[in-house]
Image (cartoon, grey):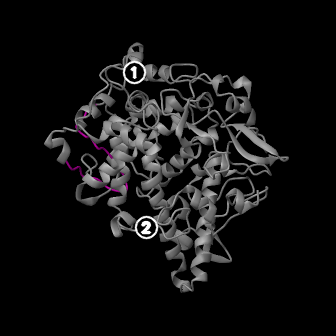
Amino acid sequence: MGILTRRGFLGGVAGAGAVALAPSPAVAQAETATSPRFFGRMFPNLPPFAENTPRVQDALRAMGAPGGLLDAKDPLHEGPVRLITNPELSPGNLDNPFHTAGTTFLGQFIDHDFTFDLSSRLAVPAVPEQSPNTRNPTLSLDSVYGGGPVQSPQLYDSNDKAKFRVESGGLFEDLPRRSDGVAIIGDPRNDENLMIAGLHVAFLLFHNRVVDRLRAQNTPSERVFAEAQRTVVWHYQWIVVHEFLPQIIGFGLTQDVLTHGRRFYRPAQGQHYMPVEFQGACYRFGHSMVRPSYRANLKGDNGQPFFGFIFDPAGEGQQDPVDLRGGRRARRRFIGWQTFFDFGDGQVRPNKRIDTHISTPLFRLPLGAIADGTPPTALPRRNLLRHLTWSLPSGQEVARAMGIPVLDTVSELKEFGFDRSTPLWYYTLREAETLGDGITLAGASARLVGEVFIGLLQLDPDSYLKQQPNWKPTLPSRNAGQFGMVDLLRFARVDPAGRGQ
């Protein structure tokens, strides 16, 4: 038997989405009128997976209930440290040997960059084409840059408008905050937890370091901000295409979409948009990758590692919460990135596999971690009820429309009535679990996610894929012509060496 390599495995897994496609010409060539300012549908002719009735709503709530089918039933009484150091305690949270723990939060950061729904309500039907997307559906970091120094001056250094505001107050960097702790950032969701807040501030510092580099190269002052923004955005887009996408859909499928084109994400007249099949279902696969607890850093808690549950009710109202929720500033509340990305020091932790088991803390979210601040607090319930908001088709119907082999029966959902017409989010998790061994997305959902990512870049007139598809990263990296998250964090000086840890 040959040696299993990451690229070889991911290339093989991707085959489920990269081959055997036989969509009808009508499906493959259809174009839908769309707008970047609103949501839309990739498959407007497919029926909803179920009628929006009280019985269906009750079934979805039961399916996503605490202690129910989706709950990994983590033994939280063991505490955050033991759940990490003794993985056998949580058999529902298996390691992904090809992802590091940071993959989850990079995925969350990306999500906040191109989609934000502030108008629809759970289980209340809405028309996607009339529902605003308050984020620009491009990978342009408007969640970081806001409207720029003129339109969003609160985000920028009052003494140097080309740079972002960055504060501290603990051992290391922090987001700028109001006196009540609310972060002053382009997207409030990027302060939901300590990891996403740390990633946001890393991007602020990354931009500021690029500004310093441009000035050292004698770039004219009137061009510094724009040049820095483009440099940051293009390196970020490179990471998405060459590091993140291969991790979540496989190297083979990523290359297939780039080389042979998109078959299903086909916006009319180049009007890129955010599809509800992606926003409301398939891309929410990342919730399955969240672990119940993490080691935030190695020495922040009085010289000892700071461990915490992702969310813990005991942290409610605490100035320095015991959990990893955002919205607070304290000495130990920073991220030691060597836990989340591989700096070669042996400290990195693996990600959780993509499957139908959701970590128990996600069934009781703090209201502050919910965009509109209203219940339900069980994240799986919220995901499932959103299918009724958008009248989403079943996973089986989407797979059939794409000409991809179908999971005809999802037998464990028979008691809820969804075994042959499965909510697309659950179907996405089941495809990954069944066809991809939890390593990557697979089947219909993998192709859908890959085509949306690459399509948004190809249809953005300012992206590197549109302007210079053969562009290579220009900033210092471990490997010339490449650039990854470890390189970004090192350049931003939030890596262990940059902090002197």
Q: Main secondary structure of the magenta part?
A: loop
* Residue at the image point whose x is 28% and y is 33% from the top: 399
- Going from N to C along the chain, the mark reached first, 2 or 1, is 1
Camera-nearest residue between 32 and 21:
21
Image quadrant where residue 464 sits: bottom left
Give the mark toward the camera: 2 or 1.
2
User: Magenta stretch containing residue 35, yes or no?
Assistant: yes
Q: Is residue 56 above or below residue 348?
A: above
Identify the residue at the far front of this view. 1
Report whether 465 appears left or right of 152. left
Residue 426: horizontal and vertical position, in percent? 42, 29
Residue at screen point 15% across, 39% down? 24
At 25% from the left edge and 51% from the top edge, which residue is drawn?
266
Question: Quadrant where the C terminus lies?
Answer: bottom right
Please give the residue where the numbered disc 2 appears in the rendered image: 472
Q: Dot 2, crowdedness within 10 Å: few (<14), some or many (≥20)? A: some
Residue designated by label 1: 56
**For the magenta stretch, what is the residue range?**
30-47
Number of marks in picture: 2
Residue sticking out furthest to the right = 302
Whether residue 222 appears in this view of the structure is yes
